[in-house]
Image (spheres, rainbow, N blue to C red):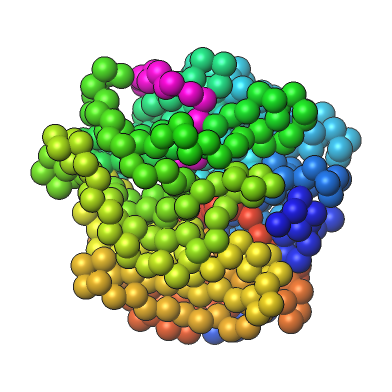
Amino acid sequence: MTAATYLEGNFAPVATEVTATDLEVTGAVPPDLAGRYIRTGPNPFAAQADTYHWFAGDGMVHGVDLHGGRPRWYRNRWVRGPEASAHLGEPPVPHADGGWYPGSGNTNVFAHASRILAVTEGSLPYELTCDLETVATRNFGGPLPAGINAHPKVDPSTGEMHVMSYGFDDPALRYHVISSAGDLLSTVDIALPAPVMLHDMGLTATRVVLFDLPVLFDLELALQGVALPFRWRPDNGARVGLLPRAGTASDVVWVDVEPCFVYHPLNAYDDGDRVVIDLVVHAHAFAEDAEPLSDRPRLERWTIDPQARTVLTETIDDRGTEFPRGDERLTGRPHRYGYTIGVPSVRDLGGLGDDPRTAVRKHDLLGGTTAEVDLGPGRIASEMVFVPAGGAAGEDDGWLMGYVYDAARDASDLVIVDAHDFGHPVATIHLPTRVPQGFHGNWIPDSALA
């Protein structure tokens, strides 16, 4: 795929901000849902077709508010980073100290400490209002010189948020713990032999899972103005590390693995002295033409034994999959279920393949089975998040929720699937515009903002 490919199909940006309040619904929205689903992704103002990179586009958030069994609105808004504010002729929003660049909030949206936050790795998160307006960047009291990564992990017992960052001039990972009230509590610096890219991390009840994988920052590419200056360097080796949550850099146990790249773990947990982590594994990344994803990424289980210094690898699903999610009330604890998007090739995410389609999958990791919802031809799913039916609901008692592009009408829907009775969607909320294929989001209930 070329840079221009990421400006075609449903990768292509939308040109305007929209507010819509009269939304058609097929089926019935679960009446107990009270909050908003928000997802972010790249939506460039003016991209050069020969140099554009999907990961670097200006951030735009897309949200649907659900209350009383109906959608109250759909909104899309550019996150007001410096370039977006300048393009829109607006004054810049206040910026706290931190991050190695301003970022655009194009990678993930989540709630913490009663705030909605949109983030790009390496930058500080942007706080948003419930109506998706940008307030300011936040540094949790800092310092966060390299910002945070795009995938914080919240411990369900303490409410603490665990995040990572990484640096290039002095290669290192930085592990931060942020309190449930939104204050930076601690930082551990972990030196690395080379400047690797780190998109995500794993968390158990006692340990942090670190990835030192062979996608490396390349100064030559950076000096050429390449938007994402990374290269696949398998000769650098690959390893996974275990850090005790209360430990220091000297306590990390590193274990070698075969060269690969991991964007997204599903979940991790302790199994005695070992750590089990389910994750999507790419054979390579940034290998040819800076292509960020490999075809047919597979869902695997790694069992990491720090005493034997081994990793047992088991394949769960090798049909092509990404965007793993689970019940985040079990973050760092043993889990049974996981949910992914079935997608053989990244081209299919943009609706660009010969017969583009995706599926929503439910993996029973205890029973060893996978169920699938086929969304139909020309219907392209993005990440689906799990929303529990209530605080006491079972692990798969709730809904999956996410945007689905419908090529037939060149617009998108918010689709809600019963995670327990896995089958046809219980509700499809038809939006008046496309939601370009993007990255990550979350269901943010009213209770998270109280």
> In the image, is residue 58 above or below residue 374?
above
What residue is rendered at 69% in x and 47% in y?
A: 289
Q: Position of residue 350 (x, y in %)?
A: 68, 65
> In the image, is residue 278 above or below residue 418?
above
**Can you see residue 324?**
yes
- Which residues are the magenta region? 180-200
**Displayed quadrant of residue 118:** top right
What residue is rendered at 77% in x and 45% in y?
A: 52
What residue is rendered at 54% in x and 84% in y?
A: 27
Between residue 395 and residue 210, name the one nearer to us: 210
Whether residue 182 is in magenta: the answer is yes
Q: Position of residue 368 (x, y in %)?
A: 25, 72
Between residue 290 and residue 53, name the one nearer to us: 290
Q: Position of residue 364 (x, y in %)?
A: 28, 70
Query: In the figure, is residue 433 to the left or right of 63?
Result: right
Q: Position of residue 314 (x, y in %)?
A: 28, 59
Query: In the figure, is residue 35 to the left or right of 418?
Result: right
Quadrant in the picture for the N terminus: bottom right
Quadrant in the picture for the C terminus: top left
